[in-house]
Amino acid sequence: MTGAAAPAAPPRGGASASQPHAAAPAGKRAGCEPVRKAGPVTMEHVLLALHETEAEREARIRDMFAFFDTAGSGQLDYAQIEAGLAALQVPAECKYARELLRACDRDRDGRVGYDDFRRYMDDKELELYRIFQAIDVEHNGCILPEELWDALIKAGIEINDEELARFVEHVDKDNNGIITFEEWRDFLLLYPNEATIENIYHHWERVCLVDIGEQAAIPEGISKHVNASKYLIAGGIAGAASRTATAPLDRLKVIMQVQTTRTSVMHAIKDIWTKGGMLGFFRGNGLNVVKVAPESAIRFYAYEMLKEYIMKRKGENKSEVGASERLIAGGLAGAVAQTAIYPIELVKTRLQTYSGEVGYVPRIGQLSRDILVHEGPRAFYRGLVPSLLGIVPYAGIDLAVYETLKDVSKTYILKDSDPGPLVQLGCGTVSGALGATCVYPLQVIRTRLQAQQANSESAYRGMSDVFWRTLHHEGVSGFYKGILPNLLKVVPAASITYLVYEAMKKNLSLD
């Protein structure tokens, strides 16, 4: 069956609940029976809504436990729960055996006895009844399509009549155009996450995306509203966390990149310490966070949307995206994000490389005004070309290698289990280091263009001028100044970024 309903419920399909807004008056549909009682929600409310006695409910839960406990041991483990969900025909992309085990396993010993299973069922049915009552504003014992539509809109999820009809059809087993509490419970009983309207919609979206019934493709319009802000939040928090943790290494890298004379890591560290103390290592960090939050948010969101667009153009599901599609989507997403925030990047570089009187740090506003007045608005985009030439392959290699490594580990090492934090850190480390090393010479050229004032006598005339002057005076090694602190920075930065990003995606129900 679809949607992880109770084992007794059959698979469903059939007629569409068309014209959801042309519904009969509330309370006049077959199956709608006012059952709400006053007072806090208790199991008595649940029994009344399900038309069950306590003994009947007990028998139903024991039958469900026995369905999973095929060995008759009285204990469920991960393998039994996974096999049970597979027997219920829960699509592979929607399996959540580990989450269900974790929700039932209160003593965290990896096994679930009947008492633990029964407590989960009690808690889940009470939770489902509460949200059922919140959606059933008429309190007539069923959810009408228009009530479900109102609840989704209030949660910020825009959905049209066709999508709403699919939602109702999927949950409505008897195809009478309404959702009873029994149908609502069957759809969500084994769904271990919190039953908020957003989570429920996302659960339906995932099931419908790979439904074994009539719906074999993504319904048009799904995800275009509900997930956009969540991807922005996940990417923004991930980027801000990683840059804050690696701010001293970023300052050290920039200082070394703009040095045209022979320098070393220790010399640069002593110079920063002498001029600014410990705070000197964090100069520009606030602006860096302001920059990287929207940059990472835009990059991750654009990447997810571009993957979906590319696969849609090819007539394939987003889940089937390959390495070449990831490379294209990652490169384009990086270019979009870098262009959007580039003026902030330039001001940050000027702030980090400012070398006026000891102890003085210019204010961001004044520094920005000086650039605008003395160099003109075009100055804010100095170095954009090498930046884009670098960010496209960097983002492409970084994201493509990361997701490819994650998929490989999931297939060959974890045996279809979700990668844990250590695996995510390893994938992020390798992908970040590889991407940064490949494009580092372009980063040096970009930083030197950013750091020099356009109206100075020794200003570079463009990226080709930077290239030839660096090659002539410093040799090939000049293009790799600061590579050590950059690698020391990019490895934990990439790892932290992806670790936080994956955690945020999970918390925001984007996985």
Image: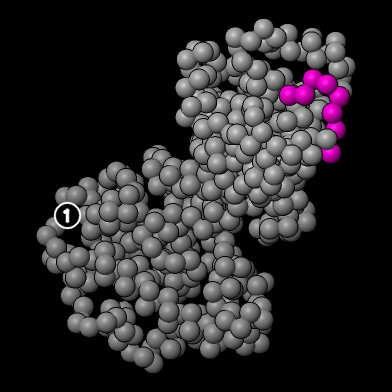
Residue displayed at 28% across by 57% down: 151
Residue 454 lies, in percent from the top left, at 60, 12
Pick whichever, 301 or 282, lies toward us: 282
Q: Secondary structure at mark 1?
A: loop
* Residue 265 lies in the magenta stretch: yes
Q: Is residue 63 magenta?
A: no
**Count of labels in the image:** 1
Magenta: main secondary structure = loop
x then y, percent, for residue 430: 77, 43
* Residue 313 visible within the image: no
- Residue under numbered circle 1: 23
Is residue 430 shown left or right of residue 307? Answer: right
477 lies left or right of 332: right
* Residue 87 falls in image quadrant: bottom right
Q: Is residue 134 visible?
A: yes
Q: Quadrant of residue 299?
A: top right
Query: In the rendered structure, which segment of residues is drawn in magenta?
Result: 258-266
Q: How is the image coloured?
A: one colour
For this rendering, which residue is in front, 482 or 130? 482
- State the residue at coordinates (76%, 35%): 271
Q: Position of residue 377 (x, y in %)?
A: 48, 15
> Measuring 27% from the left and 82% from the top, which residue is drawn there?
40
> Does residue 11 lie above or below 287 as drawn?
below
Q: Residue at x 64, y 29 (%)?
A: 357
Q: Residues within 10 Å of mark 1 (few under 14, many from 20)?
A: some
Q: Amino acid at mark 1?
A: Ala
Judge left or right: residue 125 versus residue 509: left
Q: Position of residue 425 (x, y in %)?
A: 72, 52
Q: Which residue is farthest bottom?
A: 55
Above or below: residue 349 compared with residue 507 = above
Foreground: 108 or 441?
441
